């Protein structure tokens, strides 16, 4: 049995608290986005330091990613949002290409990654995009962009959506294992 693709529309998380993870992205001001991204990346390392190695590669059930797979996904989330931010800053109202996270997990062979390398790449990708968020002006936070499904974002709502995604996934591994 493979992982069932997530087809839910999560765009509502930019406006209200997520009942699953408790994170309220709408309450995060622009000036704290980069701090949230960095703190989340550090939290992945903290979880790594307090757990045994086999735990990272084991799925809690056949339909749920292992922590290693989630870490690979979060690393790629940071990379995708860095690309989306670049488009937002260099194009007028860009239309972001689709990103199939499930195909990326298969193509990237997330389950076979080297944990330390994945976590180092996750930290580097988080730092890169956080440093980009640090430089945004008030006008850039308001620039528009669209996802291919028609969902509209500003720089700020995109960053809040990004923040929720990575916080939620760290919670996915800790809620299921702690």
Image: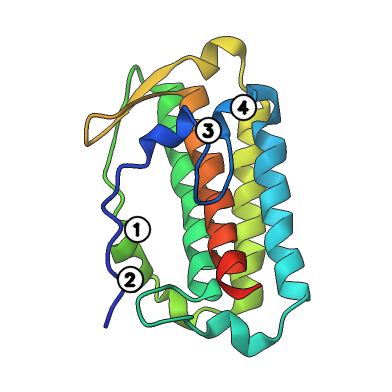
Dot in front, 2 or 1: 1
Q: Earlier in the sequence, mark 2 or mark 1?
A: 1
Q: Earlier in the sequence, mark 4 or mark 3?
A: 4
The residue singled out by tag 1 in the image is 101
State the SS at label 1: helix
Residue ID at (50%, 51%):
20
- Residue 159 has which mark? 3
Dot in front, 2 or 3: 3
Tell me the colour scheme of the image: rainbow
Which corner quadrant holds the N terminus? bottom left
Report the side of 20 relative to 51 (left or right): left
Residue 131 location, quadrant = top right
- Residue 107 has which mark? 2
Which corner quadrant holds the C terminus? bottom right
Judge whether 136 appears above or below 13 on screen. above
Cα separation, mark 1 vs mark 4, equals: 26 Å
How many residues crowd mark 2 within 10 Å: few (<14), some (14–19), many (20+)?
few
């Amino acid at each position: 049995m493979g992982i069932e693709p997530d087809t839910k529309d999560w765009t509502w998380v930019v406006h209200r608290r997520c009942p699953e993870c408790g994170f309220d992205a709408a309450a995060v001001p622009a000036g704290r986005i980069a701090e949230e991204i960095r703190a989340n990346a550090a939290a992945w390392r903290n979880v790594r330091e307090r757990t045994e190695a086999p735990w990272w590669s084991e799925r809690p059930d056949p339909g749920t990613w292992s922590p290693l797979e989630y870490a690979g996904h979060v690393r790629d989330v940071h990379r995708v949002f860095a690309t989306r931010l670049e488009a937002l800053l260099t194009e007028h109202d860009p239309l972001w290409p689709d990103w199939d996270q499930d195909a990326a997990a298969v193509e990237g062979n997330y389950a076979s990654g080297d944990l330390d390398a994945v976590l180092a790449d996750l930290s580097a990708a988080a730092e890169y995009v956080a440093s980009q968020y640090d430089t945004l002006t008030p006008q850039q936070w308001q620039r528009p962009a669209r996802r291919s499904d028609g969902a509209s974002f500003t720089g700020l709502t995109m960053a809040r959506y990004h923040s929720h995604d990575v916080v939620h996934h760290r919670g996915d591994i800790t809620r299921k294992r702690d």
